[in-house]
Image: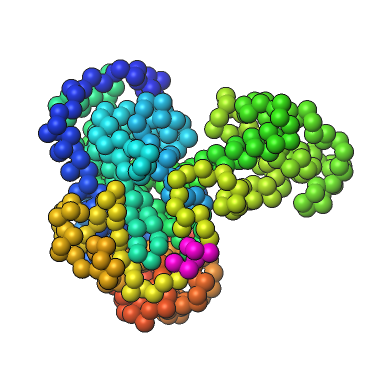
Amino acid sequence: MAAMYPLPDDFFVVPPLTTATTAWFADYGERTLRTMLDKILKKDPTMQWNYVCDVDGVRVMEGEVKGLKLDKNTIPFRVYGKITATLEEVAALHDFSTREKCLHHRKHFAEDTLDSHTLYNVIPRTEENAFKQIYVRWVAVQSPVAIIKDRDFVFVESQNDFKFTSGRRGWAYCQTSVELDALPPMKGAYDLVRGELNHTGCVYMETDQPGVLDVVYHISYDFKGSMPTWVRKLAVKNRARTVKLTADHVHQLRLNSQLQRSMSSSSSSVSTEVESVVSTATSVFSTAAAKRCVHCNASFRFRKSYQCQSCSESVCSSCSQKWKLPSGNGTSVRVCSTCSDAVRNGWEGSGVCATPASDISSHAEARQSLFKASSSSNVLETSPARLRIDVSQSEPVPARHRQSSISSASGRGSVALGLDTLDLSYLTLYHDPNKGRTNSLDEESSQVSGLSSEPNSRKCSMDVEDDPAFEKFLDHVNRHSMRLSLYVRESQCST
């Protein structure tokens, strides 16, 4: 069935948007995004998340309601991880305003996606606000097992950013299914089962390390039809891999920019096209000059030597990697680990991230000082261009109607988000499950009962490590059950 995709660009014929339908989609998108953020950023004492597996450096957790058996079709999943990227880069990668951008996203980030079409561009992105967009989209997803039918979804996708008054920013998108008369279920020749998305989306939050983002991917599918539980988990694992694919593509974009700049600075006659960059680098660099790897000092007597196409040093295969650049026709370049890490970690001074970031985002010292603010300043702040996220109300209200009802020390109209509402339990998932294991489950539980309060601890990346109320706030986290589940799974694997 995959051979018939992608579908023609004019395959879907939908009626034009009216003023009323545009307003409805915009309101629906903002409400669903705010609901999803409530699910992720607010604690829920009735929910506990059990360890499932680790996939490509991210952790997959399965939701469970205490005292209630959930329908297998509605069990939610969470994916937790970290990526090296900026909010501007991530938002730019989720631009679906054109058919070409949909195909680009499918090729680089969504290996399980058969095709994707944007039906309505309800709120397009602008130069003034590149974070906020609302689309109506159709996506066909390939089944992880050949005997199971493929699924398709029609949904509203809402994207927007938010900000804590401590200086920490975030960006999120939410996907929620809708029914359109112009798009009935595609059975017949395509044999697709129409599924539902229930506030599925991803939240990216800045950490205390510039250029690194915390990622929380909330997955809530109803695949409909008949699908075994193990097949559903396979589909969730495929979705979890998109986190790493996003990080890899950001790195590829930075390498592409770095290589083009380095080659153009060495010779004004060198073309900026990737093919010319690679061909020029290959012709200039000689692979027979060096006899040892410049990084690990390994001899090239019985192994092949490679040339880093960024620094021109001779390296071995262990100290280098081939990267497929997004521009060009599948062009690949070999870059040594040192140059790759420099591009990944040196984004602030390299100028690779040509995005409309604020001064706070581009200045490490300013950001670090903001992130060390006290936890009493953990407030969600919004500008007129941002979605106002009010944790005390059930629906978003335009900012102009709420200025008089919201008090703030700075008088700018913000909503306090205290430690009793912000759910930071996902930070404990970054612990190494293989580190410090004991033979006693009681000892294992006692080891995770405390949380490190060191200033530079990555376990406390949301400005709360110095607050005495932090331990009290963490009481709602059922860490023992999560650790016990992880320990039992590892014991079964070891036996």
Could you say where residue 207 lies in the image, as x and y percent from the top left? Answer: 46, 61
Could you say where residue 13 lies in the image, as x and y percent from the top left? Answer: 23, 19
Task: Depth check: give the residue in front, 291 or 90.
Answer: 90
Compared to residue 285, the image places residue 453 above or below, namely below
Q: What residue do we see at 22% from left, 47% from top?
A: 30
Compared to residue 81, the image places residue 485 above or below, namely below
Q: Chief secondary structure of the magenta span? A: helix
Compared to residue 275, the image places residue 336 above or below, namely below
Task: Depth check: give the residue in front, 216 or 231.
Answer: 216
Could you say where residue 10 lies in the image, as x and y percent from the top left? Answer: 30, 17
Residue 487 lies in the magenta-colored region = no
Residue 266 visible in the snapshot = yes
Q: What residue do we see at 43% from left, 39% from top?
A: 93
**In this image, 320 relative to 297: left or right?**
left
Seen from this angle, which residue lies furthest front?
A: 411
The image quadrant where one finds the N terminus is top left
Which segment is the magenta one?
A: 365-371
